Image: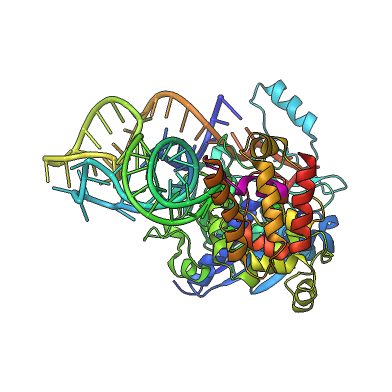
Amino acid sequence: MSSPRVRFAPAPTGFLHVGSARTALFNWLFARHHGGEMVLRVEDTDAALKTQEYVDAIIEPLRWLGLDWDSGPHFQSDRRDRHAAAIEQLVAGGSAYYCDLTRPEIEQRCEAAGLPAGYHGWSRDRDLADGPGVVVRFRCPDEGTTVVDDIVRGRVSFPNESLEDFVIRRGDGSPTFHLANAVDDHDMGITHVVRGEDLLNTTPRVQLIWQALGFGGPPDYAHLPLLVDAKRQKLSKRRDDVALDNYRARGYLPEAMVNYLALLGWGPPDEVEIRPLEEIVELFDLDAVKPAPAFFDPARLDHLNSAYICELTPAQFADRALLFAADDVDLPPPGASILDEPARLAARGHRTWPVLHALAPELQQRLSVLSESAGWIDWIVSDGIDFDDKAWRTAMVKGRAAARVLEEAEARLAGDDFSSADRLEAIVMGVGDELTESIGARVRSQPPVRVALTGTGAGLPLWEPMRLLGRDTVLARLRAARARL
RNA sequence: GCCCCCAUCGUCCAGCGGCCUAGGACGCCGGCCUUUCACGCCGGUAACACGGGUUCGAAUCCCGUUGGGGGUGCCA
């Protein structure tokens, strides 16, 4: 294939939808795989949406994912004159005509004529003049079929009689996306249009415009399978968690997200699913994309994310988790990253970073998202702890010789310098072993000590955190727990 | 209603006429490891929607049925 040129053309809605992100990714993978180019075009038919905020809401998540583009962002609203000229050309050539009918009027006519709801070319021969509030409609052929050659779906044909004369220019003079799409794709030299299946039905309209404008052969199309939720319905803003930025905010790694997105509707031939982007670029192609809808499965995303978290070095992990684990660090302003060098160095001066760094391997194997890190280490980083009632009852009330354990542990720990986690372990476990012998029944020393120090019955291995906590804090907590008995 | 798309384990993918007594991954269930939780390891569960063709041979090709989804706007 000779150097394709694709485009990602989102509408500015204030956030980037995960489905859009997947579309962007597939465009990007295709372009990169074939050594082609990608154009970023913002479909702001409504020029009011061309604000920095709306544009950033698209661009930042793309950058976060690691995607880039060779041209743009271009704005549809900047091309109004060009679109107007194309509309004029269509009207002049007889491919389009003026119409002043409102929705209710159209419905009335249908009813009166006993026709099914829809627009039945009512204004075709009314010979209307242009004017305020007048729209332009495209004259669709009454016979024949329009064929869309789709890389994912093969040949899809639409009977032209099922196509209604659709609006290409609104009453306020702005072009609709069918018109703008055809003109922009042509002018920008787009060779392949890769987008969601929800747009498949609009393709014949765009192709008809394309043809009427004398643009020659249409670009190749590839309609990607829709991303659906557990109910098998198109991911929706209302029901589902669709803003990509929410995933970033919850602690998904961009590498994991991009890897997961690549697996929706596509799979590598060797079945190795977790792999670097470069390899995916190498393996990816549109003709291997599956046509069936794909469930956006949070559980699978979590699995990928934990796998990627485990791959981080301790320093990388601490850098990334810090944002989610610390209350002693100022979050960077929007757009800035804590991973920027100055911010990173500053952050390492806080007390949470060293804790994350020291406990990285233990934490990494337990997290599916970075934001969970806080829950594992708050007893180390915070000043106080809360006791979980159930854990307290199990370890302290029902647990054998809990008071003795705490007393002994406190006494022996008081004599240690807390320089070795292994030694701390030996001391605490030794208490249990010796009591077991003297009492003649199994005494577990870890549960009471754990509850005394952490407030809960389960969590990280205690020894390294004890060392980090320091002797004074450990002894104070053991004493406090004993007093609470 | 009309137009269009889709159909392999619960889920995501592999399979593109014989290698399939259908493979991998996630999930789930069991076991091992472990004086917490988790990781890790081992094992198990589970699918070609249905009916007709075509063919020596079909999960793979064709038709139909059923089921699901998308579109039907002066949204994109």
Q: Depth check: give the residue in front, A224 or A354.
A: A354
Residue A471: x and y, percent?
74, 63
x and y, in percent, of residue A77 in the image: 79, 61
Instruction: Find out whether residue A450 is within the magenta segment.
Output: yes
- Quadrant that contains the N terminus of chain A: bottom left
Is residue A386 toward the left or the right of residue A361 in the image? right
Residue A399 appears in the figure = yes
- Give me the residue at 70% from left, 71% from top: A72
Instruction: Reply above or below: B23 against A328.
Output: above
- On screen, A276 above or below A292? below
* Residue A252 image point, x, y percent: 64, 57
- Magenta part of the chain: A441-452
Give the residue at x 57% y 54%: A429
Residue A172 at x, y = what percent? Answer: 85, 49
Q: Nearer the viewer, residue A448 or B6?
A: A448
Coloured how? rainbow
Among the 4 quarters of the image, the one containing residue A466: bottom right
Is residue A46 on the magenta stretch?
no
- Residue A213 image-quadrant placement: bottom right
Question: A76 left or right of A422?
Answer: right
Residue drawn at x 52%, y 57% as measured from the top left: A221
Residue A77 drawn above or below residue B55:
below
Task: For the C terminus of chain A, give its image quadrant.
Answer: top right
The one of A403 and B62 positioned closer to us in this rendering: A403
Q: For this view, does B56 lie left or right of residue A50?
A: left
**Residue at point 59%, 45% (across, down):** A198
